[in-house]
Image: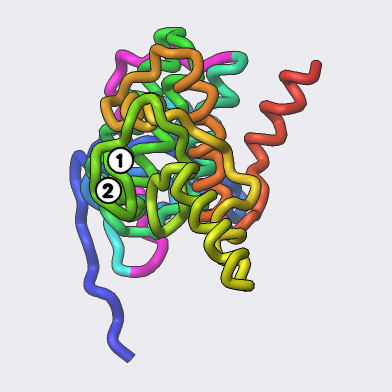
Amino acid sequence: MSRAPKQRVEQQPAWVLHTYPWRETSLIVEVFSRDHGRVALVAKGARRPYSQLRGVLMAFQPLAMDWSGGGEVKTLVRAEWQGGQPLLTGRALICGYYLNELLVRLTAREDAHPRLFAAYADATRALGRGEPESPILRRFELALLQDLGYEAGLAHEADSGDAVRPEARYLYIIERGPVRLEALEEEHRAGEDAGMPAGRADLGDQPVLAGQTLLDMAADDFSRAETLAQSKLLLRMLINHTLGGQPLQSRRVLKELQEL
């Protein structure tokens, strides 16, 4: 059985997603890096009182990291804080944990996502500046789904390829794309007339979307209240599908905070 070749990575831009204790004095650190994607690192001695790593391995802070090794878990050699990022607090902190949980749950280890890395950096910095949270989350969710392969165009109807009509109403069918509600209703009626309830599975409980919402999302414009509300429903549906229905811990915490 051949062993994986040893790897030496230096000065790699990265963000800490999650840490947990390992043995008596060390940590296992999940990081999201620009060129290597999500990587697991062992930070030896990082829990010792005088370790140089102790105050550096913080979530939501830009780092430059060196690591080496050939197995699934590499060895962290060095981590340097790059500065310029305020600490996240309050709701912004919970939103940051939500971003991290999405990355841990939905990305594979050592699978590079440079566009998604840039989107994560943008989102984290915007949260640190105290910008409104909802547009930040919607932009990141959309970037994540697109990077995972959900490339069905928001601005074009799934079946015809025609441009989405801003005044029309749509459903977004998974693995298909935006379909006008009127067309689905006609499809359903035709199926019933033929004794076959075709189209019923398509209708489901999915959110009805204004065409303008889809066009706004395609243009990265979340300034309209309706677009913000409807895009949240659509992106949540797609993320839940991608997660296989498994709940997110950070989403539960956000919900509890809203109830309080």
**In the image, is residue 143 above or below residue 44?**
above
User: x, y (%) of residue 121?
Assistant: 32, 28
**Neighbourhood count class around disc 2 (C-alpha, 10 Å): few under 14, some 14–19, many 20 upward:** many
x and y percentages locating residue 132 in the rendered image:
47, 11
Residue 113 image label: 2
Tell me what residue is drawn at x 56 percent, y 34 percent.
233
Secondary structure beneath dot 1 equals: helix
- Residue 54 seen in the figure: no
Q: Position of residue 247 (x, y in %)?
A: 67, 48
Q: Secondary structure at mark 2?
A: loop
Query: What separation in Å lies between label 2 and label 1 (alpha carbons)?
Result: 5 Å
Q: Are marks 2 and 1 in contact (CB under 8 Å)?
A: yes
Residue situated in front as seen by the camera: 137 or 167: 167
Residue that badge 1 annotates: 116
Give the residues drawn in magenta, as a range: 71-89
Quarter holding residue 195: bottom right
Q: Nearer the viewer, residue 209 or 25?
A: 209
Position of residue 207 relative to residue 258, above or below, is below
Residue at the top extreme? Answer: 130
